[in-house]
Amino acid sequence: MSTQVQVASDKSITEIFEKQKFYLPVLKRRSARERVRRLKGLAEIIKDYQGRIETAGYKDFYKPAIEVKAMEVYPVLNELTYVTKYLKHWMKPRPVPGGLKLVGTRSEIVYEPVGNVLVISPWNYPFHLTMIPVIHAIAAGNSVIIKPSEMSPHTSELIRELIDAVFDRREVSVIQGDHTTAESLLEQPFNHIVFTGSPNIGRVVMEKASSHLAGVTLELGGKTPALIDTEADLKKAVPAIVWGKMANAGQTCLCPDYVLVPQTMKKEVLDQLAAQLHKAYGDTKKILNGKDFARIVNSRHFRRLQHLLDDAVEKGAEIVYGGDYVESDNFIEPTIVTDIPEEAAIMEEEIFGPILPVVTYRSLDQAINFINRNKRPLGIYAFTNNKEKANDIIARTTSGNVVINDVFANYINPALPFGGINDSGMGRLHGEYGFRQLSNEKAVVRRSRGWTLADLMMPPYKNGSQKLAKLLMRYF
């Protein structure tokens, strides 16, 4: 399904950028009350548009309405509620201690906008992953240009309409187009860029940002493992993994990319995964005739997934569930594959589709070493009822997030920072962390009118000054 979008020219991009840059002083002076009022206005129109957001998601790639509600609209409204509740507190200057060496002064951190912010958002959660950084940018007093994905055109057009209904374009503006539009935008001297997408494009964004010394926030996904321990409750672990993996047809940056299973539990886990998949979605015919399973976003991504699966099978992997597909519909059935050699491409790159590799291990040490041999993931899902083992996994691995005995729970808590590390991203969003990410934390020191230690250190230097300096060194 397709829709026409208004593509901006290079000239119009520059004009919009310059207008927003000129308007920044107005935004910087806005009080917490004014910023909250705009964010609440955004929340109200999102509620009004909810049905249309669901329809747009279905038109783009058959995204089920319940998944749009739960994974697109709700997280945004949840974030808005949290940010509007605490923004006034976050905006207050934060006093910090100075100690004896700064007697006679007062130190504080003042939060000011970073300036012009560019948000380049993806197609997989086109509404949600656009609005979250936009909320933080507005809360921090910035102007924003949004470049939504051309691969989810119905949602992108709805975002443009929604934003235009709430904000002055000097404050927030949507610019549509393909990768050439994104390239033109990256030539502008933005102060900060928020990008969600693949590591390869993330490197390009970072390189372009460096030419203007712009700050960057990158959410890049990666191969998030789900680790099932011998002491896991499979009745809870298996449904959580199946839902986390297959929601949005596996096109989720934080979904379980593969499952690590004890060798002794391999058959039991495979049987339960297959039974849960059948219970949740039924056979191919039922999925194709229903509205509970999204499609792959386009034919290019479909072919990429088909290649990953074919490559794994050619190298000795076994499909133990699913494997059917309908190319004309960009449909791939929920699929489980096991006995995969490590050199298979499916174990090297993020899958981003409804294919779940199951990898066995003989000891927890071996499982942890397997995770650590790969690039640092965005998250780790560990299923165990043994607290010591859970703490061991947390302590001995490095990732953006860890969830014990659940999936996605970290993401829906706005009080937690969200983001990756190295190949899975950099920077943090959500709640106060998103506000700080898109604020300049300005250090301010206020000297009192009275005497300070600095008065004793002014030249000309006398013997007394030397003795005082020696004495003060004890306190540094």
Image (cartoon, grey):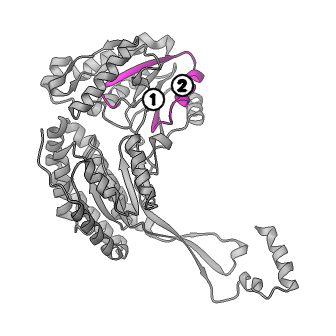
**Left or right, residue 228 beside residue 246:** right
Asked whether 34 or 15 is in front, the reply is: 15
x 37%, y 40%: residue: 198
**Placement of the N terminus among the 4 image quadrants:** top left
Is 369 colored magenta in this rendering?
yes
The answer to whether residue 269 is seen in the rendering is yes
Residue 365 location in percent, x, y? 60, 23
Which residue is disc 2 drawn over?
A: 370
Type of residue at label 2? Answer: Phe
x 21%, y 51%: residue: 177
* Marks 1,2: beta carbons within 8 A: yes
**Left or right, residue 78 beside residue 379:** left
Q: In this view, does 88 lie above or below 301?
A: below
Task: Estimate how packed mark 1 is, as few (under 14), some (14 to 19) or many (20 or more) residues with alpha carbons within 10 Å.
Answer: many
Asked whether 428 or 227 is in front, the reply is: 428
Which residue is disc 1 drawn over?
A: 225
**Left or right, residue 401 beside residue 97:** left
